[in-house]
Image: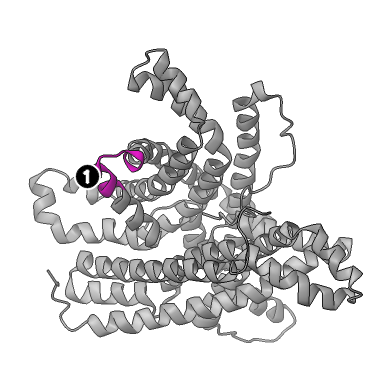
């Protein structure tokens, strides 16, 4: 086992790098999708509301694997059209399709988390902003977003944990992330339990490492509240029936 | 607007049946194993509690796909290597059906354990006292007084687990179990119309989600019958 780890560590580290990269890119992109979607879901404009609701319903109601296949293999059906508008070179790349599907997926879940955070802001604070004469954009930037992020942070860090784990699915479209490396090494040397065992440990380190970091961020976000949040890291909100 | 499925429609229907079967079987396993784990976490001795804690911590931190592959490919090779070391040469076949249901049960029982535990803690203490003052022995008090109320608190969480579990069954297509995703993949490859078939598969998952949402709302309403809201 020890020689197995030493021999294959460089490849696993490459995989780990790719996993972190995919999680980071898709979370950032997903957040950028989620914010307008959450605002559209809260808006009174029927068209915006229906579009955003349809998007959230589709991406939360279908498996991520189906979404990855739909984008990676499905785009092949529209190859002519995609080449015409110059996008085929993107959809041909597994890495691009992986990031796109992961981002669209997490964007749907994140928008619901953000929507909950925004809806939980006391009305008085937004009215205070209006009374100060702040424009809609300024209110969003100075009042709504900072408050919503603070309220939604525990739920959002839970989503990031799922996102880290979800990246493992892209190994199916030939990407060499931690799972992809484990599958390649396992089937080459017939060392399945060692390879997947190492992969599992790497994900555990990544997930609980992130949760430790997330606790620090949470403490920082609510430092003015003087609350003690220095407990051991734990997956939050599972107990509340919110596993995703 | 109905696309031409070129006779592969029945393959999708067969896949849907398999998906539902695997999901329901895993859900039943999850409910039972989760309850056992939760009871262990609440009542058992310190070492058993640590063991269950380790199980839920590990399972919730490892991707489902990695656990599935570890169980499907890893366990047979581990057993073969261990038995091989003792001088016997055997091959241990593992069926994708068993591996799939086993993995999903193992994963979601860890989540169900947390749901049950939170539900147990949500039952007001007065209910325990009331059961005791009626002279009910602890085991009967748990079964007749606490457990039914626990289930009401657990219902939203259980529904949530079902929604996640039904989508997680798609992963079992990776180990070639002919469920919805796998059959859509077969149809997509032979017709060269991947978008059509994966989109049809997505629509079928959406139908399952919609029906589940409807049933969950009904179940929650049913469980709340006779409970006066607001008088907590």
Q: Quadrant of residue A87?
A: top left
Q: Nearer the viewer, residue B194 or B214?
A: B214
Q: Quadrant of residue A86?
A: top left
Q: Nearer the viewer, residue A165 or B203?
A: B203
Rendering coords of residue B172 (x, y %): 46, 72
Which chain hosts label 1? A
Residue bounds of the magenta highlight = A40-52
Q: Residue at x 39, y 83 (%)?
A: B17
Q: Residues within 10 Å of mark 1 (few under 14, many from 20)?
A: few
Rendering coords of residue A25 (x, y %): 41, 39
Q: Residue at x 26, y 85 (%)?
A: B10
Rendering coords of residue B89 (x, y %): 65, 86
Rendering coords of residue A1 (x, y %): 68, 60
Establish if A149 lies above or below B71: above
Residue A193 visible (yes or no): no
Quarter of the image where the N terminus of chain B is located: bottom left
Q: Is residue A80 magenta?
A: no
Residue A199 visible (yes or no): yes
The scheme the figure's colours follow is one colour
Establish if A198 lies above or below A38: below
Q: Quadrant of residue B40?
A: bottom right
Q: Residue at x 66, y 76 (%)?
A: B32
Q: Residue furthest top?
A: A132
Q: Is residue A110 left or right of residue B142?
A: left
Please, what is the dominant secondary structure of the magenta stretch?
A: helix
Q: Which residue is mark 1?
A: A47
Establish if A185 lies above or below B191: above
Q: Is residue A45 magenta?
A: yes
Local secondary structure at mark 1 = helix
Q: Residue at x 32, y 57 (%)?
A: A58
Q: Nearer the viewer, residue A5 or A31?
A: A31
Q: Nearer the viewer, residue B6 or A91?
A: B6
């Amino acid at each position: 086992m020890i020689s197995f780890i030493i021999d294959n560590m460089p490849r696993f580290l490459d995989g780990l790098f790719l996993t972190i990269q995919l999680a980071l890119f898709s979370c950032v992109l997903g957040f950028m999708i989620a914010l307008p979607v959450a605002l559209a879901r809260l808006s009174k404009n029927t068209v915006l509301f229906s579009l955003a609701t349809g998007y959230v319903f589709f991406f939360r109601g279908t498996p991520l694997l189906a979404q990855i296949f739909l984008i990676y293999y499905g785009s092949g059906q529209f190859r002519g059209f995609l080449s015409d508008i110059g996008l085929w070179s993107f959809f041909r790349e597994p890495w691009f399709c992986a990031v796109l599907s992961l981002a669209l997926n997490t964007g749907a879940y994140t928008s619901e988390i953000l929507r909950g955070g925004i809806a939980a802001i006391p009305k008085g604070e937004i009215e205070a902003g209006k009374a100060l004469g702040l424009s809609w954009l300024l209110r969003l930037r100075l009042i709504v977003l900072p408050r919503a992020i603070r309220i939604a942070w525990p739920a959002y860090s839970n989503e990031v944990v799922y996102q880290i784990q979800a990246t493992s699915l892209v190994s199916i479209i030939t990407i060499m992330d931690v799972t992809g490396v484990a599958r390649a090494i396992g089937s080459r040397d017939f060392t399945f339990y060692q390879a997947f065992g190492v992969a599992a440990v790497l994900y555990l380190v990544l997930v609980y490492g992130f949760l430790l970091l997330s606790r620090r961020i949470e403490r920082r976000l609510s430092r003015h509240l003087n609350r003690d949040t220095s407990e051991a890291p734990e997956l939050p909100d599972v107990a509340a029936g919110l596993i995703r | 607007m109905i696309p031409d499925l070129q006779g592969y429609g029945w393959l999708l229907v067969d896949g849907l049946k398999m998906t539902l079967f695997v999901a329901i079987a895993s859900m039943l396993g999850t409910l039972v194993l989760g309850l056992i784990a939760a009871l262990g976490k609440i009542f058992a001795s310190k070492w058993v509690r640590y063991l269950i804690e380790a199980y839920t911590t590990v399972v919730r931190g490892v991707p489902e796909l990695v656990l599935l592959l570890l169980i499907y490919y890893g366990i047979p090779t581990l057993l073969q290597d261990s038995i091989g070391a003792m001088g016997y040469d055997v091959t241990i076949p593992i069926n994708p059906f068993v591996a799939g249901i086993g993995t999903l049960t193992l994963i979601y029982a860890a989540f169900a354990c947390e749901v049950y535990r939170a539900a147990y803690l949500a039952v007001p203490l007065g209910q325990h006292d009331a059961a005791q003052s009626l002279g009910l022995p602890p085991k009967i008090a748990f079964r007749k007084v606490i457990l039914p109320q626990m289930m009401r608190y657990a219902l939203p969480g259980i529904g949530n687990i079902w929604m996640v579990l039904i989508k997680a069954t798609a992963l079992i297509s990776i180990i070639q179990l002919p469920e919805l995703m796998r059959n859509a993949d077969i149809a997509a490859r032979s017709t060269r119309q991947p978008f059509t078939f994966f989109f049809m598969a997505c629509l079928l998952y959406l139908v399952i989600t919609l029906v589940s949402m409807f049933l969950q709302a009904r179940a929650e309403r049913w469980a709340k019958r006779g409970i006066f809201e607001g008088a907590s």
